[in-house]
Image: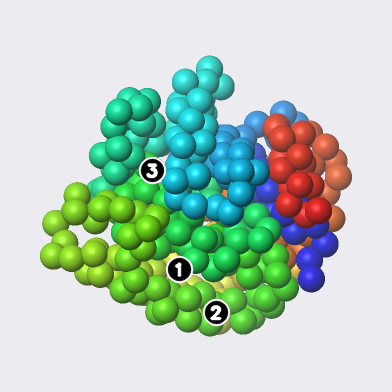
Amino acid sequence: MSKRPATGALLGLALGDALGFPTEFKTVELIESMFGPWRTLELPQRARVSDDTQMTLALGRGLRRAMARGPLTPAGLEPPLREEFVDWYESPDNNRAPGNTCLTACRLLMDEGRGWQDASQIGSKGCGANMRVAPIGLAPGLSAEQRSGAAQLQSALTHGHPTALAASDLTAHAVHLLAGGTRPAALVGRLRAHALERRTRYDHLWLGDLWTRSQDPGPEHFVARGWDECLAILDRIEAAVATHSPETDPCVATGEGWVAEEAFATGLLCFLLFPDEPVTALRRAACTAGDSDSIACLTGAFAGAWLGADAWPADWTGRIEYREDLLALGTLWDA
């Protein structure tokens, strides 16, 4: 069992975010020319995070509020999540290159008379939903149905594409499994079983009539599209773990991470290449040609869930932005 997995995952997520924030949008060659070899990449002295960590904390606060009121339900989770996302949208600190999907959806969510399904960006499978979903995999006491439903609902508030829903569900499940002691070598098999079990299961309780905004002939067809893309990427992860050189950009194997299933896959690949070297895994994730901060924040969440809070150097965690908020949430759920 991991030691303080919730604290470890949240700190790891923020550290990966801060390490990858300066390297995003750059080629590997440019990153190494600016910051040195990838294995020596250092956390900036001012360890600022991006919207990835900000939205993770917004989700964490909304989830904490909902769970304080009793068993988690969609009716209990949606209002506080909506409030937290709108607060983030309106915050003066929301100046860290947030994604257009999140901005558009949160602006629509400000209209309290609008159903959340009408704010959801049904065509977007950007990585903005699964890079923030880790709190749902860490919160204690949730059933498998609650965890899956909540992961998909929080995605659907902004990113309504079925692949965004499936990737968020899969990311939360991976974090949950690692925090519970599932060994990294067994993880992809467990995730594939979860995807196959969920493949045609549209959760009407948590998603309502979201699927009707798509062009799909039915809800099962809608949700299967997302799971099929995630099943395909799990095959690529499995192949890459066996054959990919850690010295080569992981994006070559599993994609640059601008879309949900690729961010999940490349973040997980970086962790699986170095399951017991969390800082090395973060450095590899941050030195990538793709969406480096989102890839690295997912890597950090996986590594921290597996290894716990002591995985991270004290001089790094001591200066991460939002440290007190991250520790408060992690401590609550580790207790």
Q: Residue at position x 50%, y 44% from top?
A: 76
Which kind of residue does numbered mark 3 sit on?
Answer: Leu
101, 210: nearer the viewer: 210
Circle 2 SS class: helix
| Residue at x 46% of width, y 37% of height | 79
Residue located at (82% from left, 62% from top): 3
Asked which quadrant contains residue 136, the reply is bottom right
Report how far apart the C-alphas of labels 3 and 1 lie in the structure: 30 Å
Pointer 1 residue = 253
Please, is residue 290 above or below residue 46 in the view?
below
Label number found at residue 157: 3
Q: Secondary structure at mark 3?
A: loop
Q: Nearer the viewer, residue 148 or 97?
A: 148
Q: Nearer the viewer, residue 300 or 207?
A: 207
- Relative to 70, say whether 223 is above or below: below
Look at mark 2 in the image and give the residue it sits on: 190
Which amino acid, by three-letter code, is at mark 1? Ala
